[in-house]
Image: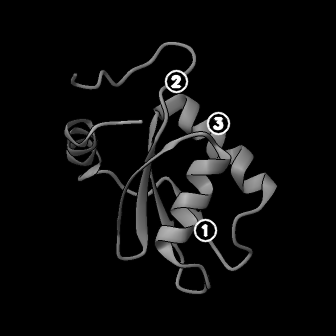
Amino acid sequence: MITSKQRSYLKGIAHDMDPMSHIGKEGITESYLKQLDQILEARELVKVSLQKNSLLDTKEAANEVAQALEAEFVQAIGRKFIIYREAKEDPVIELPR
């Protein structure tokens, strides 16, 4: 569980990031989760965009993805959300205490 201070820090890092992953009309599939798992392991912080043809609610999709990948939900704005998970090997982002 991340603290509000850590969440704020991650929001600052993610502010200028472009979405690295997109959820389309197929929704959240096993293959999508495997792909996102690999991105999280490499980058730790990922911004995801819901396409206009996706019928999912942003916060519901974010929580579903975070739970499936054992990640932390950071923020959702509009049709984008941010999730974080510390890398198992060689963590890059150092969270404030």
User: Within 10 angstroms of label 3, few (less than 14), some, or many (20 or more) residues?
Assistant: few
Q: 51 or 84, which lies in front?
A: 84
The amino acid sitting under disc 2 is Ala
First in sequence: mark 3 or mark 1?
Answer: 1
Q: Is residue 60 left or right of residue 80?
A: right
| Distance from the alpha carbon under mark 3 to that under mark 2 | 10 Å
| Distance from the alpha carbon under mark 3 to that under mark 1 | 16 Å
The amino acid sitting under disc 1 is Ile
Where, by quadrant of the figure, is residue 97 drawn? top left
| Distance from the alpha carbon under mark 1 to that under mark 2 | 22 Å
Q: Residue 3: x, y in percent?
A: 28, 37
The residue to which callout 3 is attached is: 38
First in sequence: mark 1 or mark 2?
Answer: 1
The residue to which callout 2 is attached is: 87
The amino acid sitting under disc 3 is Gln
Residue shown at 49% from the left, 52% from the top: 20
Q: Is residue 6 left or right of residue 37?
A: left
Q: Residue 44: x, y in percent?
A: 46, 34
Q: Residue 65: x, y in percent?
A: 61, 55
Query: Element at badge 1?
Result: strand
Residue found at the very far top of the displayed protein: 90
Q: Are marks 3 and 2 in contact (CB under 8 Å)?
A: no
